[in-house]
Amino acid sequence: MDRRHHSGSAITVAATGVLITAVALFGAVEVWSSALISASVFTLFLVWVLCLCTKNGFPESVQKDGRRERVILFAVFLCFTGYGVLQTIPLPSALVKIVSPATFHLYSFYSVDRDPRMFLSLYPYKTQTELIRIFTYTLFFLLFAYSIRSAHSLERTVKILSYFGFALAVFALVQKATWNDKLYWFREISGASPFGPFVNRNHFAGFAGMLIPLTLGVAFTRQSRERQALFGFFALIMSVALFLSLSRAGILSFFAGITIFTLFLLWHRLRTKKIWALVSFLFILLLYLLYLGIGPIVDRFYQTDIGKEERLTVWADTFRAFQDFAVTGTGLGTYMHVFPLYSADTSRFLYDHAHCDYLEFLLETGTIGVLLLCLFLFFFLKYSFGGSWTGTKGVTKIALLSSMVTIAVHSIFDFNLHIPSNALMLAAVMGMAYAQRRFSQEEYPD
């Protein structure tokens, strides 16, 4: 292993440590913890760049990438970030009146100036803050995408996350069994439904949901039965913790991820034994839940009354707001400041998020932002998951894709991607997916 390869491995391990720290700090949702994690990511990225500069340029992992692919993918991303920056730049009022009449009306109504400066964002400072967070997640993606330079490094990273996921699940279950109304048994909270280190059980379920397919992927690619059983047990305990969190969206997204995992195994005919192993995993999970008590889980779904779900009203009001800002949106990070103008009188709470990441993104960025995001995802999926799906590399691809599907489904019902630790986890999974495309099947042990 050369020195550049070694430095890349160290950076990957350090980045994984930052992710674990973010989870431990209540998901990094508080200002101090979010700032600490962002500073850590920026510092780590700077160290990585300095290592590259002092070791004669870019690593082989960058050179192997097709230049055309890199240019297209990053050009689309730069267009999106450029659009976010445009939302914070003062524009002529005549132009704003044309592209976003509702924005023009609000600025005109609340301003005392005859010709006020107008922004596409209704709260430019919040948009700038959100852009910094997106930039942080992008750097985290790049760290995983290019510091992982071999199949062995990728495998080790996923194994570290699997060990952590197991420890996280055990901690969550122990804390639930000994709950004293305090996180970590000392941090008092109120008006929340915590689980593990997360203030909200849905956010624990969102994070664990991404880890479970990755851990199953490790189990299915081990050579010895002992290692297969070990990582299968890790995934099992994570799944039990997810179900006992009583997160309905988490449970639904778990089944979505497992369904994708199963369908791809069947589609690519990756050994019948793996299908039976997955069936056995689900059967043992059911036995665990029956033993521990499945009643609260069933009651959680049974008590759901679609007619009384205020979330549906929030979604309807959010879409109504989007219709007024359909082209350019209200600006990244502005949801909680815009939504009260459109919320129903029957709403009992002040919502800072739409409980649907897609609707919130739709309102804040408009049609332009959604089109740019869809374009980025199209090229990302095309470049990351193209090629062979056979053998160990195929199972690795399935695990990574299932992890992304799990959080994608969960985001329909919640705002996981506005929780820094969960957004960082998704960035890491996407980075690993982008990295694995460079590795040949021969690099994976069978």
Image (spheres, rainbow, N blue to C red):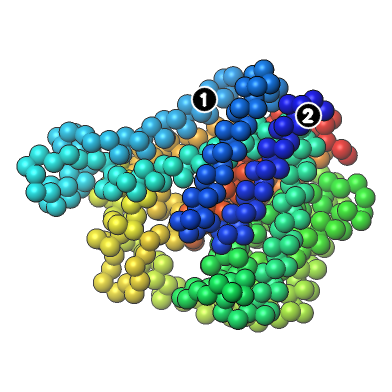
| Residue drawn at 61 percent across, 41 percent down | 430
User: Is residue 63 visible to us here?
Assistant: no
Name the foreground residue: 311 vs 154. 154
Give the image quarter of residue 127: top left
The residue under label 1 is 72
- Decide: is 255 above or below 330: below
Residue 215 image position (x, y, % from top left): 75, 53
| Residue drawn at 30 percent across, 44 percent down | 124
Residue 63 image position (x, y, % from top left): 66, 20
- Secondary structure of residue under mark 1: helix
What number is the disc on residue 424? none
Give the image quarter of residue 244: bottom right
Q: Give the distance between the C-alpha atoms of the residues marked 2 and 1, in whole angstroms.
A: 23 Å
The residue under label 2 is 440
**What amino acid type is highlighted by mark number 2?**
Ser
Name the foreground residue: 130 vs 298. 130
CB under 8 Å between callouts 2 and 1? no
Mark 1 is surrounded, within 10 Å at the Cα level, by few (under 14), some (14 to 19) or many (20 or more) other residues, namely some
User: Is residue 236 visible to us here?
Assistant: yes
Residue 418 image position (x, y, % from top left): 48, 54
> Could you tell me which quadrant the N terminus lies in?
top right
**What amino acid type is highlighted by mark number 1?**
Ile
| Residue drawn at 41 percent across, 38 percent down | 371
The answer to which of marks 2 and 1 sits earlier in the sequence is 1
